[in-house]
Amino acid sequence: MACKSVISRIKPWLLNSKGYSFSDVDANIRLHLNESPIPPPKHVLEYVAEVLHHGNLYINSKLFREFRELIADYVGVDVESVFPYAGGDSALRAVFHGLLEPGDRVLLLQPTYGMFDVFTSTRGLKKDVVNLEECGDWWCLDLTELIVKAKNADLVVVDDPNNPTGSPILKGDFKLISELAEAVKGFLLIDETYFEFSEYTAVPLIRDYPNIIVSRSMSKAFSLAGFRLGYLVSSPEVIEALSKEYTPFDIPLPSLAAGVAALRDPSYVKTVVDVIKRNRDLMLRELRRLGIRSYNSLTNFILIRDSRDLRSLLLRHGIAIKAVGEDLYRVSVGSEEQCAKFIKVLGESGSV
């Protein structure tokens, strides 16, 4: 009886929502989570080790302030226009839960990053979609449809480049982004998780369009996935409102130290990006040589189409990839050795 009473008090949209589906796999080669194959550099690890001796204390507010200032400097905006979070997902959650209420309308791409659907569901939001279609070796969408549907949306979410296709969406086209920001009823959230790979951004537009919010992560090009660091960039008014729910203590001390050290000297990021791009291009050439349908990418992963159960096939060889749809698989770009093993297994597995 007590259980029934408790369940009846849980909001129906949360009770009936579907959470993020994740079950890690035991694989020697992890190509399923878009992780960097390159560990954090020495100067980051040394600073993290240094602050561990102060683990009995809450973080120093000066360190949090420095992290925020370093992000602002890296992005090229005033410090009032950025706020750090414990991971990119936490930054995204802040937008969904801070700016929307149950019943509001969200416009998503399809396919898109899985957490957008999770936040839409757990927040009790109404969802509309714009479908991506194959356009040669890329994926694209009807931009007119996007702008028209944006007029009824309290939040439009565009992951650019898109996950899982790896394709550019708005392509840093300021005229298009401005038109979309003007059309949307509420806010335009542009997820730039893979900015360091695509090298285009909507950030310069936040000055003229305060309803634009840009989210970024330090998991990919910065090689800090395990430290869980992300941030939002927007108008000072939006950042001030969203930051009210959070404190400097939300980011664990080791993670904060990693972020500070990385941004004090971010020169290593170019090396990470260059290595991944080189390996990505190699993977694409080899996949196409094998006759496997592979799409171009501006990220650290490649989308492939194959009618076989590639996930199970590769897992038997200690390689994990992610199934993202019917006959579709997302493959992270690993080290040169990991990519070679991946191609070797596919080559020995027979025809598509």
Image: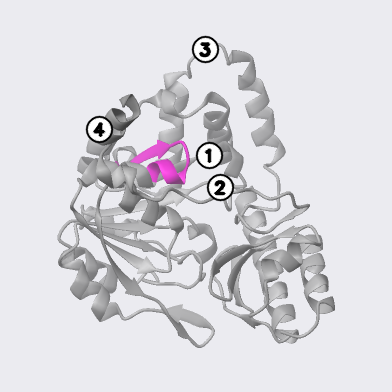
The residue depicted at 19 percent of the width and 62 percent of the height is 153
Which element carries disc 4, helix, strand or loop?
Answer: helix
Looking at the rendered structure, which numbered label has been put on residue 228? 1
Report the span colored magenta.
Answer: 81-91
Label 3 secondary element: loop
Question: Do the residues bearing badges 1 and 3 touch, measured as CB atoms within 8 Å?
Answer: no
Q: CA distance from mark 1 to mark 2?
A: 7 Å
Q: Residues within 10 Å of mark 1 (few under 14, many from 20)?
A: many
Of residue 250 and residue 273, the one placed in the foreground of this image is: 250
Q: Are marks 4 and 1 in contact (CB under 8 Å)?
A: no
State yes or no: discs 3 and 4 in contact (Cβ < 8 Å).
no
Q: Residue tagged by mark 4?
A: 9
Amino acid type of the residue that numbered disc 4 sits on in the rendered structure: Arg
Q: In the rendered view of the protein, which quadrant contains the N terminus? A: top left
Viewer-side label of 4, 1: 4
Point out the tag, 1 or 2, that comes first from the N-terminus: 2
- Select label 3 or label 4 by which is in front: 4
Foreground tag (2 vs 4): 4
Q: Are dots 1 and 2 in contact, CB under 8 Å?
A: yes
The amino acid marked with disc number 1 is Arg
The answer to whether one can see residue 57 in this image is yes
Q: Element under label 1?
A: loop
Rate crowding at label 2 as few (under 14), some (14 to 19) or many (20 or more) other CA atoms within 10 Å. Answer: many
Q: Quadrant of residue 266?
A: top right
Pointer 3 and pointer 2: residues touching (CB < 8 Å)?
no
| Residue topped by disc 2 | 219
Q: Is residue 289 magenta?
A: no
